[in-house]
Every structure is written in C-alpha cells, then in structure tokens.
Image (cartoon, helix red, strand yellow):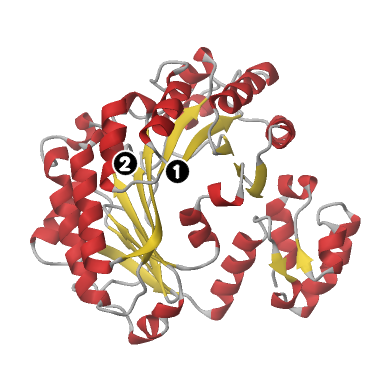
Amino acid sequence: MPSALPDGDPAPLDGRLPAAALRCADRTPFGIYVHVPFCTTRCGYCDFNTYTAAELGSGVSRGSYADTVLAEIRLAAGVLGSALPPVSTVFFGGGTPTLLPAEHLGLVLAELRERFGSAADVEVTTEANPETVTPGYLARLREAGFTRISLGMQSAVPRVLEILDRKHRPGRPEQAVAEAHAAGFEHVNLDLIYGAPQESDADWQASLDSAIAAGPDHISAYALVVEQGTALARQVAAGIVPAPDDDVLADRYLMAEQTLSAAGYGWYEVSNWARTPAARCRHNELYWTGSNWWGFGPGAHSHLGGVRWWNVKHPARYAALLDAGRSPAAGREVLGQAERHTERVMLAVRRREGLSTAELDPRARSSVAQLVSWGLLEAVAAAQGRVVLTGRGRLMADSVVRELLP
C-alpha cells in the first residue's frame, strides 16, 4: 500500500500561497515534478503512490489523466503568476510514466512550457520501465523535448528480479539504454537496487557489471528498504524471507563504489554516480539544494519559499477536486528556520560538494575534527572549511548528520 501523507495545516481551496513565499521566488531555480500513478503490477517492495488497474477500479482512466494534470497546471499558473524564473528542470516520475502515450506526456510538457516558460538548457526527464518503451516511443519522447530517461533495471539476475517482483526480461534494460542513445537522449540513467533477500555478492557484482557494460551516463544504486505495508514487509514479518542485513548492505555499497569508480563513474550524491558533471541529474540536485518546485499529480509534494504542500493521494479524488475548480492540495506546512537548517544539513552532507562549516552552529563545528578523526569526513576538505563524507562516512551519513545538528 502507498505510504501515508504527512500531517499538516489545511491548504487553501484555491491553492494560493503566502506572499512571503512568492516574494523572492525569482531568485531561486524552479523545477516541475509530474507524478504518473499507474503501474501494470505492484512490486513487492514498493510503497510509492501508485496503482494497478485492479486497485483503481473504473473511476480513473489513463486516457484522461493528462487532461487532469493540465487542469492543475492552469491552477498553478494562476497562483504563481510571473513570480518565478523559467523552468530549469522537469521530471516525470511514478509509477510508470511511459504507460501513457508519448503524445500525452508531450502535451503536458508543452503546456508547462506555455504557462511557465523554460530555460534554454532545460532538463526534461522521464522514468521508464524498460518493457514499456520501444525505439518508436523513445523517438516520439525525444521529439517532444525529453532530454533524459531513467530506466528501472534493479538487477541483472533473473531470480533477484523475481524476488523483487520485477517483470522486465533480463537484458531488456541494457537494450533500452542503446535504444535511448540511438533516439538522441542526452543522458541515460540506470537504477539498481541491492540487498534483496537471497541476493549474493556475485549477483550484485553481475548487476553492476551489466549496468556498466550497457554504457549509461549515470547509475543510481539504492539499498533495499522494507517499507511498512508492502508485500515484502509481510514476508519479512512472517519469516518467509530475511530482512536486509546492515553489514551486507554496507559491503554491497562499497562494491558499488569500487566498481563504478573504476569504470569512470564519480559519486556526486550518496546513491548516485555520473560519468561527467553534465550527466548529473539536475532535477534531483534542485531538491538537494533546497530550490523551488511544483509537484503535479496525486500525492505529489511541492516546495516554494519555505512552504511545503502535498496533494491528495487517490487519483479519483485528485481529479474530482480539479473538476470542481479546487486545489488538490491535502495539507501544507510553513518551514521555520530550524526546520530549513535541518533539511539543509541533511541534504547537503550527502552531496560530493558537502556543506560549508560556516553554516553549522558552534557546537556542530566543534564536532568536525572528531568526525575527521573517526574517518567519516575528508580531512583536506575540513581544513578548507567544508564537510565532505569519506567512503566510510557515506555508510554512516545519518549518524554524521546527527552529530552536525543542534
């Protein structure tokens, strides 16, 4: 089941934002996230806000979904007016955005450009299940203006894919990488997951090797997390499969770092490696640097000028509110200085550039030397006034963050 929405204050029915949030908006990069909540099947580990046809019933249609998103785009344009700079990044996520016709994704992108404008070097990304794209589909996406695609590979090993409930054929993600490059995508990403039950070191090494051999510009590698309410969580609770072991996950991460760096991929965020700085996912960097974005679609989250809000989760309720001329926002919160500082530290520490020690309070600055002595922060960077994780520090990033917060 999808995870629950956070608590918060009621959101205005018309979606309006505090004047203070808009006042300095033109000084901060602005991105767009579009959530597409459809999947053909639900993976056992997934708690994202996604729905299969059986879970949705007859109240929601993929064919009309783009029109519903267009209604929220028009609402957002009325709320924001001319307060924002042109859109710098657009990201279609899910779910599986590529279950929609390429022309529908193109319509949404065209509406975003018309309403908000786009930077000359705008990055436009979609996630994709490898089985949902063909050379012709990819060509239509590229023609519509998409520049980047992120393909869900997860593993190259059939039995691991089966454990994860992934339905694509082994070898299909690698084939899709070649097709995306042939279609003219500027950057292609492969997503991997490590730590599945019964996955061996050799399995994980085979997945890394296959991903590298496919020649993507960017590789993401995430540790498997057992999310409450998922099929995997029920299997773990029943003793059918073991929970991921922290020591095994650490070893797998170190394998990823060693293998990817040897192949020319440099880490720029704890779970992300890119061949070149240009191949980094700029949309994710927008999140990690506390910039502004509007999230369209059911369950999507947004942030602008210290105000965060989130939409209702179910696609039918989302559509009904927009049909009634109302904002689909379910709640919101205004972040105080303490909350914004906490998020700044949590996100910046995970990046290769790290965090300036000047942004820390005096007690936290005094902890930096100790963290260096423990081998968790780079000594050279610390001497230059920056907090940058070592390889060991990346394994303990959450612990480092706790040391650096009041």
Instruction: Tell which of 198 and 269 is nearer to you.
Output: 269
Q: Nearer the viewer, residue 234 or 160?
A: 160
**In the image, 371: left or right of 404?**
right
Which quadrant does the N terminus fall into?
Answer: top left
- Secondary structure, mark 1, is loop
Residue 59 position, x and y percent, is 11, 41
Residue at label 2? 142
Q: Is residue 134 among the parts visible in the rendering? A: no
Give the SS element for disc 2.
helix
Q: Position of residue 253 (x, y in %)?
A: 69, 35
Q: Residue furthest top?
A: 159
Tell me where residue 215 sits by quadrant.
Answer: top right
Tag count = 2
Q: Residue at x 50, y 34 (%)?
A: 190
* Residue at the disc numbered 1: 186
- Find the distance from the CA under tag 2 to the CA under tag 1: 9 Å
Check the image and report above or below for 251 versus 279.
Answer: above
Mark 2 surroundings: few (<14), some (14-19) or many (≥20) residues within 10 A: many
Q: Position of residue 159 (x, y in %)?
A: 52, 13
- Name the residue type under label 1: Glu
Q: Nearer the viewer, residue 398 or 288?
A: 288
Q: Amino acid at mark 2?
A: Arg
Q: Is residue 70 left or right of residue 214?
A: left
Which mark sits nearer the N-terminus, 2 or 1? 2
Q: Residue at x 47, y 17 (%)?
A: 171
